């Protein structure tokens, strides 16, 4: 079906276009006339319509490109159509960007309203758009090359050698042009009126080269230190397969233990089993009716039953005895059952605070024992309680990353150490430990370490030997290598000081730290530590197999605390697989 012919021109007295070629004058004149009565249009023949629209060919001048364009515009104006068709045709040969821009502009107005748009507004929009296109083209041509600006933020102290680099692209106008001169490593000799001294010049060049080498080595050391800071929310792998009762002794002998140390462990576990209470728990007030006053040195009377139970269970679990295997499985089962009975379910998780003013000691040690029991056995009956205890640790963490006596309180490093060990065991058992909780541990350690990064304090930067051992051990568990200079400085410090003659808490953490580093300094410490523990263990009476040391911690924890800590110290050879032998592993097996 053929398209209908264009409508006839408005009857303005003649058929020639009036005013502007776009027909705007005609429309304005029409709008000013009074309304006319309705008329019935008369049909017109095709010949009359054609003759009224087209002038005689004899009267037309020689057609040119402009004349043809004006004729087209005149026809569009007389027919009431827009100018956009001819403009689109003119833009057909222009760049694609211009065509797209014009189409976008024409779409700003509905089609039925385009004829009412003032011409000056169309012209204004078109020229502004054209100027924007020219600016974009100019910028594109002048931005052919970019330079990168390196903004590095480096800590003023060497203990935190993290380097953050941000690269931004800059145009030629953003940054000052680089200097055409490049500073040489060695300054070139300057002309002098004096006689040149070749030997002096060579010595100067050599000294300058040495200085430059020292600078480069210092930068390399900073880079190495920065690369040793891990941002992974994980703990290093420390397998527990060495606790297998069928090969425990073999692993102990291979890692520095002896038959005497294994015998001492068994004697200690026997003493602990004999002092378990009827409800399955242990208490710092350890005396039973069978002691007959032969086991002096009880601990404090505070409500630390969950902590005491956790310590005793950790000693059994460290030697491979679980509620599923070994001669002490019933002893361990009763202890685990006690913890699962007293756990208090709260909106923040399962709590072992046990109504104690220093309740996070209770919770951290008990949760540590429960997570290790689940890690060693995979018993599904323990999973829920273990996860709930981990959730409570997560919610009790202070905003600075540590743990205090009670949930959310400012933390200290000794109490935080128990919570972190519980989290590490939970992570190895594939329980849920939030990444944010693990990463905040690093921030907390940063607030406790001294400038060099080797020594740690109790609640602020300091040089506490026990806190230093805890801090460096956690750094290892968080991924710091055993060859890091800060780790090696700590090893040298403990080698020089030697084992304490009464602080078993200190000796336990130092032994665990040095074992994961290895080397001849560990061998030296191990020999002295073995001799000390074997010499001080009780060998007769009802107290046979136990330890007690008269210091602040010994008086607080009593004989039960001292015995459990010494037993765990002698279990170090198989309690965890040493990190220095697993530097390429990243996850618990």
Image (spheres, helix red, strand yellow):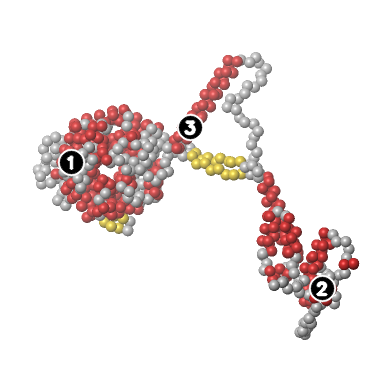
Mark 3 and mark 1 in contact (Cβ < 8 Å)? Answer: no
Mark 3 and mark 2 in contact (Cβ < 8 Å)? Answer: no
Vertical order, 148 against 183 (above or below) = below
Residue under numbered circle 1: 269
Give the Cα distance between marks 2 and 1. 119 Å
Q: Earlier in the sequence, mark 2 or mark 1?
A: 2
**Residue 220, labelled with which disc?**
3
Vertical order, 366 against 71 (above or below) = above
Could you classify mark 1 by the number of other residues whose Cα lies within 10 Å: few (under 14), some (14-19), or many (20 or more)? many
Q: Earlier in the sequence, mark 2 or mark 3?
A: 2
Residue lying at 19% horizontally and 37% vertically, measured from the top left: 265
Residue under numbered circle 2: 50
Q: Nearer the viewer, mark 2 or mark 1?
A: 2
Label 1: element kind: helix
Label 3: element kind: helix
Can residue 456 be seen? no
Residue lying at 35% horizontally and 50% vertically, measured from the top left: 433
Residue lying at 88% horizontally and 69% vertically, measured from the top left: 56
Label 2: element kind: helix
Give the Cα distance between marks 1 and 3. 50 Å
Residue lying at 29% horizontally and 39% vertically, measured from the top left: 576
Vertical order, 189 against 265 (above or below) = above
Q: Quadrant of residue 19?
A: bottom right
Give the Cα distance between marks 2 and 3. 90 Å
115 relative position to 196: left or right: right
**Residue 255, labelled with which disc?**
none
Q: Position of residue 380 (x, y in %)?
A: 26, 53
Q: Earlier in the sequence, mark 1 or mark 3?
A: 3
């Amino acid at each position: 079906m053929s398209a209908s012919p264009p409508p006839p021109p408005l009857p303005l007295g003649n058929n020639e276009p009036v005013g502007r070629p776009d027909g705007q004058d005609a429309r304005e004149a029409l709008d000013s006339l009074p309304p006319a009565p309705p008329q019935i249009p008369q049909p017109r023949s095709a010949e009359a319509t054609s003759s009224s629209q087209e002038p005689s060919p004899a009267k037309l001048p020689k057609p040119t490109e402009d004349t043809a364009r004006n004729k087209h515009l005149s026809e569009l104006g007389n027919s009431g159509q827009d100018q956009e068709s001819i403009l689109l045709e003119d833009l057909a040969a222009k760049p694609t960007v211009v065509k797209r821009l014009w189409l976008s502009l024409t779409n700003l107005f509905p089609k039925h309203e385009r004829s009412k748009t003032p011409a000056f507004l169309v012209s204004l929009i078109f020229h502004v758009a054209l100027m924007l296109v020219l600016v974009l083209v100019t910028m594109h041509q002048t931005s052919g090359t970019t330079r990168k600006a390196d903004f590095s933020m480096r800590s003023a102290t060497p203990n935190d050698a993290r380097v953050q680099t941000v690269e931004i692209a800059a145009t030629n106008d953003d940054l000052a042009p680089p200097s055409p001169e490049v500073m040489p490593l060695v300054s070139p000799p300057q002309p002098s009126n004096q006689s040149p001294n070749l030997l002096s010049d060579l010595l100067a060049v050599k000294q300058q080269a040495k200085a430059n080498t020292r600078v480069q080595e210092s930068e390399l050391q900073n880079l190495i230190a920065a690369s040793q800071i891990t941002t992974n929310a994980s703990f290093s792998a420390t397998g527990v397969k060495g606790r297998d009762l069928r090969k425990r002794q073999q692993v102990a002998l291979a890692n520095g233990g002896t038959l005497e140390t294994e015998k001492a462990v068994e004697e200690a576990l026997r003493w602990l089993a004999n002092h378990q209470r009827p409800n399955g728990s242990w208490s710092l007030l350890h005396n039973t009716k069978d002691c007959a006053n032969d086991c002096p040195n009880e601990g404090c009377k505070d409500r630390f039953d969950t902590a005491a139970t956790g310590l005793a269970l950790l000693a059994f679990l460290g030697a491979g005895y679980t509620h599923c295997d070994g001669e002490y499985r019933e002893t361990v089962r009763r202890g685990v059952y006690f913890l699962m009975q007293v756990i208090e379910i709260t909106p923040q998780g399962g709590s072992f605070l046990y109504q104690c003013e220093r309740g996070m000691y209770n919770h951290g040690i008990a949760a540590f024992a429960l997570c290790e029991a689940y890690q060693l056995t995979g018993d599904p009956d323990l999973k829920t309680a273990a996860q709930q205890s981990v959730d409570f640790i997560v919610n009790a963490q202070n905003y600075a990353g540590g743990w205090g006596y009670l949930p959310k309180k400012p933390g200290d490093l000794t109490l935080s150490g128990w919570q972190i060990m519980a989290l590490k065991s939970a992570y190895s058992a594939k329980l849920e430990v939030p990444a944010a909780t693990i990463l905040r541990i690093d921030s907390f350690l940063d607030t406790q370490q001294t400038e060099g990064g080797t020594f740690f304090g109790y609640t602020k930067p300091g040089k506490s030997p026990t806190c230093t051992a805890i801090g460096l051990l956690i750094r290892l568990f968080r991924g710091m290598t055993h060859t890091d200079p800060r780790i090696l400085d700590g090893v040298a410090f403990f080698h020089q000081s030697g084992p304490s003659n009464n602080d078993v808490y200190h000796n336990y953490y130092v032994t665990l730290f040095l074992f994961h580093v290895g080397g001849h300094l560990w061998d030296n410490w191990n020999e002295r530590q073995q001799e000390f523990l074997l010499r001080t263990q009780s060998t007769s009476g009802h107290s046979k197999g136990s330890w007690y040391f008269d210091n602040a911690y010994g008086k607080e924890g009593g004989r039960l605390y001292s015995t459990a800590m010494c037993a765990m110290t002698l279990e170090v050879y198989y309690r965890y697989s040493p990190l220095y032998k697993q530097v390429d592993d990243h996850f618990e097996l």
